[in-house]
């Protein structure tokens, strides 16, 4: 028997209001949905040797890859990392920027910034990178 959209929507609303639901835990970053399974997200600690590090970001719905955690000292070293540099080969690649609001998220901006992806999470700020700013929804 097929479940109606109204029933599915009602369950989603119920899950959204329950702070202990898997949906709420995923939105808080406590669980990742990967290949139909839920798993705890990986956590890392900033390097203790004073160097910055880039922790590769791959969305939780993608599996089968080992994430890279690489140290760097300069912007040039960061941009030369293979998992970072390959973004420059994408059509309409615009630039790299840094979201400083929720930590230090290295962003790849595509199509003049209208499309963007989180590439890595950095331990520390890289002042040479421009700040990432979301495009206003009313301009999309």
Image: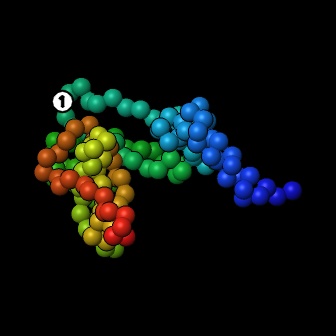
Does residue 44 sit above or below 93 in this rendering? Answer: above
Q: Position of residue 32 (x, y in %)?
A: 53, 41
Residue under numbered circle 1: 50
Mark 1, other Cα within 10 Å: few <14 / some 14–19 / many ≥20: few
Q: Which residue is drawn at 55% across and 39% down?
A: 24
Left of 59 or right of it: where is 23?
right
Viewer-closest of 103 and 72 = 103
Residue sitting at x 22%, y 38%: 124
Mark 1 lies on a secondary structure that is loop
Q: Can residue 135 be seen in this view?
A: yes
The residue positioned 45% from the left and 35% from the top of the image is 42
Residue 127, x across and y down, in percent:
13, 46
Residue at coordinates 17% horizontally, 55% vertically from top-left?
Answer: 130
26 relative to 112, above or below: above
- Answer with the quarter of the image where residue 39 lies: top right
Colouring of the image = rainbow
């Amino acid at each position: 028997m097929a479940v109606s959209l109204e029933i599915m929507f009602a369950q989603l609303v119920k899950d959204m209001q329950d702070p202990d639901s898997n949906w709420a835990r995923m939105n808080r970053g406590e669980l990742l949905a990967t290949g139909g399974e839920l798993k705890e997200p990986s956590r890392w600690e900033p390097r203790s040797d004073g160097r910055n590090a880039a922790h590769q970001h791959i969305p939780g719905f993608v599996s089968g890859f080992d994430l890279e955690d690489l140290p760097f000292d300069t912007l040039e070293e960061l941009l030369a990392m293979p998992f970072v540099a390959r973004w420059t080969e994408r059509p309409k690649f615009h630039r790299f920027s840094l979201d400083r609001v929720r930590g230090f998220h290295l962003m790849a901006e595509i199509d003049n910034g209208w499309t963007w992806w989180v590439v890595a999470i950095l331990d520390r700020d890289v002042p040479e990178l421009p700040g990432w700013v979301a495009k206003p929804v009313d301009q999309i």
